[in-house]
Amino acid sequence: MEKKNIDWANLGFGYMQTDYRFVSNYKNGAWDDGMLTEDANVVINECAGVLQYAQTVFEGMKAYTTEDGRIVTFRPDLNAERMAQSAARLEMPVFPQDKFVEAVLKTIKANEAYVPPFGSGATLYVRPYMFGSNPVIGVKPAEEYQFRVLTTPVGPYFKGGVKPLTIRVCDFDRAAPNGTGHIKAGLNYAMSLHAIVDAHKQGYDENMYLDAATRTYVEETGGANFLFVTKDGKVVTPKSNSILPSITRRSLIQVAQEYLGLEAEEREIPLEEVKDMAECGLCGTAAVISPVGKIVDHGKEICLPSGMTEMGPVTKKLYETLTGIQMGTIKAPEGWIVEVK
Ligand code: PLP
Ligand code: COI
């Protein structure tokens, strides 16, 4: 199979239409078998549930080319599980988890020509998503749904690749204590748009959201979880019921403990404690681990000792180990890597 003529090394994090996507419809209480299609457009009624009341959930994952030329994906079972949890919270029918993984693998395989080569710095981003498709005008769940998987080749999420980011403590809240912050619903991202546009206007790369109830604990950013390294070398990540349970973050905790022999824990992290941290990073499928160099809290600057020129040493080891596992140069824990072909 011949690869597309794409300048892989200079890809940003954007949408590029690829050849195939998977589509399955839910009607009369059941999902159909679904199929691949070349049609990138979605045609739905003007009153579809997703358009009126934002009934939509999604996932984000990646396909990688390994050094020996295999195409693999990372822990797709956990994306399937999280999408099921997201759907249930928005009163949507669950797309069966085994079928989810099958659909993802099928879509990646069909778009093999777009999977960036090993060492190019790019990956194929995979976006499974689901939305209410029939007309709804009273506030209630739709009765019909569409599940789709699209793919697009991507480069780094943040321009500048691994250059440390400057983020600000945000005055807007991302998620309410008993709300939807822990699921991957489109609505969480819609409400973060004003905050991110404003952050960019003010010269910041991202927002640090705090817990909405007390505004004293670190939550996450608009598209990634936080990871900190304490001055005594412990990896700590925020624990909260209103942040997305990042698969990257959960994997990194295990990598820290089992591959790097570090202590790692998930616990509440007061904003007040951040000034004492040695390193900070944003972790997620899109972000991988993007280092943070500076956090600005209403004019007060917290400069991480790791600085503004490169990743901190522990962050770097975590990054290299995780990406080594994903790209097949480091042996993965059982079940983490699923081969597409
Ligand atoms: N937090 C938010 C709000 C996200 O959108 C994402 C991206 O998926 C993450 C965290 C990271 O999650 P994961 O590592 O599963 O991609
Ligand atoms: C991902 O990392 O997959 C996400 O969905 C985050 C999004 C901001 C691109």
Image: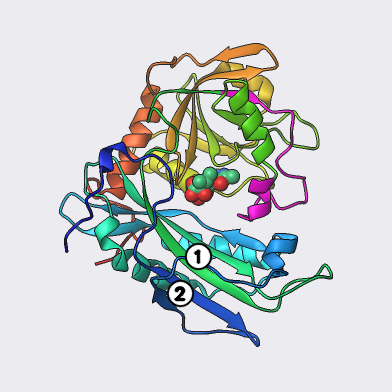
What color scheme is it? rainbow
Residue 144 on image: x %, y %: 65, 78
* Residue occupying image coordinates x 40% and y 58%: 151
Residue 145 is covered by the magenta coloring: no
Secondary element at image label 2: helix
Write down the residue under mark 2: 98
Q: Which amino acid lies under the numbered mark 2 shown in the image of this protein?
A: Asp
Q: Report if the beta carbon of the residue with label 1 is closer than 8 angstroms to ligand 1.
A: no
**Residue 220: mark:** none
Give residue 201's quadrant in the image: top right
Q: CA distance from mark 1 to mark 2?
A: 8 Å
Q: Quadrant of the N terminus?
A: bottom left
Report which quarter residue 186 is drawn in: bottom right
Q: Amino acid at mark 1?
A: Ala
Q: Is residue 169 above or below residue 192?
A: above
Residue that mark 1 sits on: 80
Residue located at (64% from left, 45% from top): 243
Q: Position of residue 246 (x, y in %)?
A: 53, 48
* Percent x, y of residue 204: 57, 23
Q: Is residue 334 above or below residue 205?
A: below
The disc, 1 or 2, on the residue closer to the chain's N-terminal end is 1
Residue at 82 percent of width and 67 percent of height: 139
Q: Nearer the viewer, residue 24 or 226?
A: 24
Q: Position of residue 194 (x, y in %)?
A: 68, 36
Q: Pick whichever, 177 or 116, lies toward us.
A: 116
The residue closer to the viewer here, 321 or 149, is: 149
The residue range painted magenta reads 167-190
Which SS class for mark 1? Answer: helix
| Residue 88 located left or right of residue 317 | right
The reply to whether the C-beta atoms of the residues labelled 1 and 2 are less than 8 Å apart is yes
The quarter of the picture where the C terminus appears is bottom left
| The magenta stretch spans residue 181 | yes
